[in-house]
Image (spheres, grey):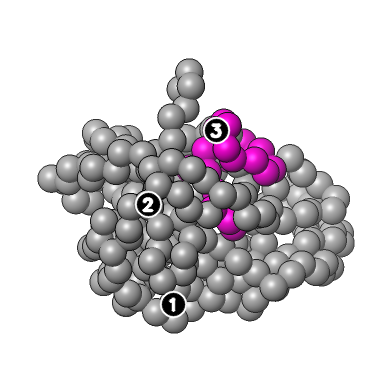
């Protein structure tokens, strides 16, 4: 399968764990799909959702640390009090982003808005954009990636995460489901895609067909995918079976 592989790096990143509301804020080990589609949206300059692009990724970092940050707690319409929280962050993050939707090459070559790996202060840079051919294999290794849960061969931290958010304010999560954050090396037996250079498995989260609702501050509207005439690629064996879903 022909895809573009985009290598993106940063200094630090932090991905909020939705189980923690206040106090110490640990980071997820891997970005949720909503963060990846936020990255695509910034690059494209318009809303990009799972209806528009299939994606897969491998995310790595050099370690974790904890920082102090000032937060402001609203005490009324015109008043707020400051507080200090501890926030965990990842050091020297890098992501290899894969997509068969080749029209995104131009978006990453000339991003419309700053690219972020997490919070608004976590600036990121595109270091390489390559067109490669993923090879189909009967055995591969998954590590540092996000896969749907459950699957008998996959294990790791299980977390309910959104795929994307609405355009309206306040943001509302969409596509909530359970995912497995795979941080350890797992040998997978079965039909899969693999990066022939990196020798790791690439799991592609498929596009969702059909029109969809994109609310904004001005008026709700129905939008078609950016590539209106797309056909879902043949990726048998890539999307894992999900019993009952």
User: Reading the chain from its start, which is encountered first: label 3 or label 2?
Assistant: 2
SS for dot 1: strand
User: Reading the chain from its start, which is encountered first: label 3 or label 1?
Assistant: 1
Q: Magenta stretch: residue 182 in it?
A: no
Q: Which residue is mark 3?
A: 151
Res 150 → quadrant: top right
Answer with left or right where residue 219 lies relative to residue 79: left
Q: Magenta stretch: residue 161 in it?
A: yes
Label 3 close to label 1 by CB (< 8 Å): no
- Counting from the top left corner in percent of width and height, residue 191 is at 38, 43
Q: Tell me the mark number nearer the camera, choosing from 3 and 1.
A: 3
Answer with left or right where residue 80 lies relative to residue 111: right
Res 51 → quadrant: top left
Query: Which mark is drawn over residue 60?
Result: none
Q: Tell me the mark number nearer the camera, choosing from 2 and 1.
A: 2
Label 3 close to label 2 by CB (< 8 Å): no
Q: What residue sits 59% from the left and 40% below the top?
A: 154
SS for dot 3: loop
The magenta region covers: 142-163
Q: Which residue is mark 1?
A: 126
Label 2 close to label 1 by CB (< 8 Å): no
Q: Nearer the viewer, residue 226 or 190?
A: 190
Q: Nearer the viewer, residue 19 or 236?
A: 236
Residue at the bottom extreme, as displayed: 127
Q: What residue sits 26% from the left and 36% below the top?
A: 209
Q: What residue sits 46% from the left and 65% below the top?
A: 199
Query: Which mark is drawn over residue 137?
Result: 2
CA neighbours of label 2 inside 10 A, class few (<14), some (14 to 19), many (20+): some
Q: Tell me the mark number nearer the camera, choosing from 3 and 2.
A: 2
- CA gap, disc 3 and disc 1: 33 Å
- Counting from the top left corner in percent of width and height, residue 54 is at 34, 49
Task: Work out whether residue 144 can be spotted.
Answer: yes
């Amino acid at each position: 399968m022909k895809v573009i592989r985009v290598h993106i790096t940063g200094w630090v990143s932090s991905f909020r764990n939705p189980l923690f509301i206040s106090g110490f804020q640990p980071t997820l080990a891997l970005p949720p799909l909503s963060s990846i589609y936020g990255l695509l949206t910034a690059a494209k300059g318009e809303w990009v959702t799972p209806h528009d692009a299939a994606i897969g990724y491998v995310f790595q970092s050099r370690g974790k640390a904890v920082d102090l940050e000032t937060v402001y707690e609203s005490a009324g319409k015109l008043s707020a009090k400051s507080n200090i929280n501890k926030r965990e962050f990842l050091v020297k993050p890098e992501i290899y982003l894969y997509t068969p939707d080749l029209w995104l090459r131009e978006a990453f070559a000339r991003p419309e808005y700053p690219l972020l790996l997490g919070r608004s202060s976590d600036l990121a840079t595109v270091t390489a954009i390559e067109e490669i051919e993923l090879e189909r294999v009967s055995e591969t290794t998954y590590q540092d990636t996000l896969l749907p849960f459950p699957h008998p061969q996959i294990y790791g931290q299980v977390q309910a995460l959104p795929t994307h958010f609405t355009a309206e304010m306040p943001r509302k999560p969409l596509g909530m489901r359970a995912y497995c954050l795979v941080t350890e090396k797992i040998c997978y037996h079965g039909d899969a895609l693999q990066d022939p250079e990196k020798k790791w498995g690439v799991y592609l989260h498929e596009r969702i067909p059909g029109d969809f609702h994109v609310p904004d501050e001005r008026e709700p509207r129905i939008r078609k995918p950016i590539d209106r005439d797309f056909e879902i690629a043949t990726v048998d064996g890539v999307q894992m079976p999900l019993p009952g879903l």
